[in-house]
């Protein structure tokens, strides 16, 4: 059972990122439903935000590999 | 209707090829293992080795000093340097590559295992000339309270420990500190050169077409790429960079198509299982270029926001804000590196895990019924993942380009 704790830590980080990306998707869909003509702007901003949130999970992943 | 049937047929053929290609390769690997096992069974009692999914996956996603298509191994130039020993330059064909990418020869104290060059760690080993390698074996060793995987080579009746592989970080991020540097033209390097060449010729032609067809509708390959180029211009460059976008558009288009092409090439079965954008060194290189372009084009306004954010109390700036903003300069390219690497590598790994189901259920080819069940399970899963990976290839190329554009946009923004 080597590396179990780091795996748990990484899993926790991924939960956080998952909630974050879920909220971004939720709000983006709502925004598109309210204002369908702004779909292009909303989509690119949604992907940008999702990518930034994902970055945190990736840092956790790397830290879990190193430790 | 006909079109959709054609698409479905294409994916079916694609999937079958992929499945059988991997299957052949795996059974070959397994066969090799069996041979080795029977030869050593006389010496020591060995438990029957189970199919090791992890090793197979890491072997397939890693960079290699040979380029293997199917069962053919094309040798690549090998350029090695070791302090105290100097340079060794030769073709990796001199290793006499056998199955599984294991070399049969040791040259200047270097051996080839699973397509990668390793160096014999023992100082007393006579490194001169070419020596026969009987076999290469995996083992476990305690290093700093952790079990690390090490490899041993049998040369001239002796067992020698091998140093870790040469990596860009010198083994600091795992893998162990090593004693040599590998500057070889590896599989990934070959693919980057090929992609650069392909894109150069393609876009040279497209540029010529624009001159020739001036005022007319685009034709042929030009009309295929025009929507993508317009997309990068209108959805990425213009909104994020602003009116000075023309200066950065060539760079953005270059990274977009470079990453996209490499991502898609990595999806082709039977093509040496290249995982170029899933290699940390490659994505790090791309991110470092982005880092320099962003920071060199940074205006006064940008640096002011980094080092002395206006409108914030001085003690907040001095204690928290400036250190975080300064670290942010480096975290941005760091996450760019990892995002591309992790997404592409994860995709390749999942496909390989699903293919591994065949060998897990089939008990490495001994259980035919299990293999059939495994194949039937793996087939739809692999089809699904390969399709998803094609989408991910586009999304990751887009995300990388868009993030670089947004960083450049923040750097060139004027005071307002």
Image: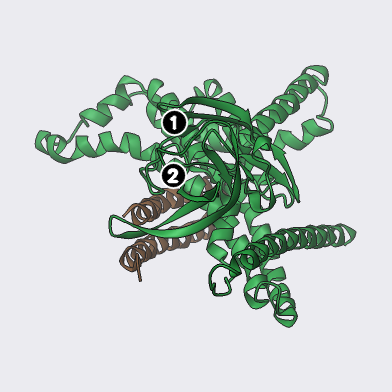
Chain colours: A brown, B green
| B333 relative position to B286: left or right | left
Q: Between residues B60 and B149, which one lies in front from this camera angle?
A: B149
Label 1: chain? B
- Label 2 Cα crowd, 10 Å radius (few <14 / some 14-19 / many 20+): many
Write down the quadrant of residue B347 in the picture: bottom right
Residue furthest left as drawn: B315
The quadrant of the picture occupied by the C terminus of chain B is: top left
Residue B191, horizontal then vertical, whole percent: 65, 36
| B405 relative position to B186: left or right | left
Q: Which residue is mark 2?
A: B163
Residue sitting at x 41%, y 36%: B179
| B140 relative position to B10: left or right | left
Q: Between residues B290 and B230, which one lies in front from this camera angle?
A: B290
When the figure is inspected, residue B324 is found, relative to residue B114, above or below; the finding is above
Residue B159, horizontal then vertical, whole percent: 48, 51
The quadrant of the picture occupied by the N terminus of chain B is: bottom right
Residue A16, horizontal then vertical, whole percent: 35, 62
Write down the quadrant of residue A61 in the picture: bottom left
Residue furthest top as drawn: B211
Q: How many marks?
A: 2
Q: Tag 2's secondary structure? A: loop
Label of residue B288 in the image: 1
**Between disc 2 and disc 1, whose residue precedes?**
2
């Amino acid at each position: 059972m080597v590396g179990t704790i780091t795996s748990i830590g990484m899993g926790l980080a991924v939960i956080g990122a998952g909630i974050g990306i879920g909220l971004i998707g939720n709000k983006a869909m709502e925004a598109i439903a309210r204002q369908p003509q702004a779909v292009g702007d909303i989509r690119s901003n949604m992907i940008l935000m999702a990518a930034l949130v994902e970055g945190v999970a990736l840092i956790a992943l790397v830290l879990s590999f190193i430790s | 209707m006909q079109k959709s049937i054609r698409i479905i047929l294409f994916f079916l053929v694609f999937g079958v090829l992929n499945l059988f290609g991997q299957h052949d390769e795996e059974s070959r690997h397994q066969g090799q293992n069996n041979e080795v096992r029977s030869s050593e069974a006389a010496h020591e009692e060995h438990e029957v080795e189970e199919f090791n999914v992890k090793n197979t996956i890491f072997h397939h996603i890693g960079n290699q000093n040979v380029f293997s298509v199917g069962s053919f191994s094309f040798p690549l130039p090998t350029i090695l340097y070791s302090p105290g020993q100097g340079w060794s330059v030769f073709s990796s064909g001199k290793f006499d590559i056998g199955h599984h990418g294991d070399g049969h020869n040791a040259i200047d104290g270097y051996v080839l295992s699973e397509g990668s060059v390793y160096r014999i760690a023992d100082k007393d080993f006579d490194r001169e000339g070419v020596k026969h390698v009987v076999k290469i074996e995996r083992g476990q060793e305690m290093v700093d309270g952790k079990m690390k995987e090490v490899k041993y080579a049998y040369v001239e009746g002796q067992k020698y420990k091998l140093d870790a592989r040469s990596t860009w970080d010198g083994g600091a991020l795992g893998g162990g500190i090593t004693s040599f540097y590998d500057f070889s033209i590896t599989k990934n390097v070959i693919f980057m050169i090929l992609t650069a060449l392909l894109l150069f010729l393609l876009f040279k032609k497209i540029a010529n077409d624009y001159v020739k067809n001036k005022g007319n509708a685009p034709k042929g390959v030009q009309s295929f790429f025009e929507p993508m180029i317009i997309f990068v211009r209108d959805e990425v460059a213009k909104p994020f960079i602003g009116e000075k976008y023309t200066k950065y558009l060539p760079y953005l288009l270059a990274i977009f198509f470079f990453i996209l092409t490499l991502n898609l090439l990595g999806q082709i079965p039977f093509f040496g299982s290249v995982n170029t954008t899933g290699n940390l060194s490659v994505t790090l290189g791309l991110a470092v270029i982005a880092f320099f372009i962003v920071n060199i084009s940074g205006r006064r306004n940008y640096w002011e926001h980094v080092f002395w954010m206006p409108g914030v109390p001085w003690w907040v700036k001095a204690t928290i804000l400036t250190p975080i903003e300064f670290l942010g300069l480096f975290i941005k390219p760091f996450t760019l590196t990892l995002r591309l690497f992790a997404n592409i590598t994860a995709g390749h790994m999942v496909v390989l895990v699903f293919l591994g189901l065949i060998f897990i259920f089939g008990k490495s080819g001994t259980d035919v019924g299990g293999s059939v069940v495994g194949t039937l399970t793996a087939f739809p899963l692999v089809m699904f993942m390969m399709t998803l990976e094609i989408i991910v290839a586009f999304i990751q190329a887009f995300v990388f380009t868009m993030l670089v554009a947004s960083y450049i946009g923040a750097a060139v923004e004027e005071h307002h």
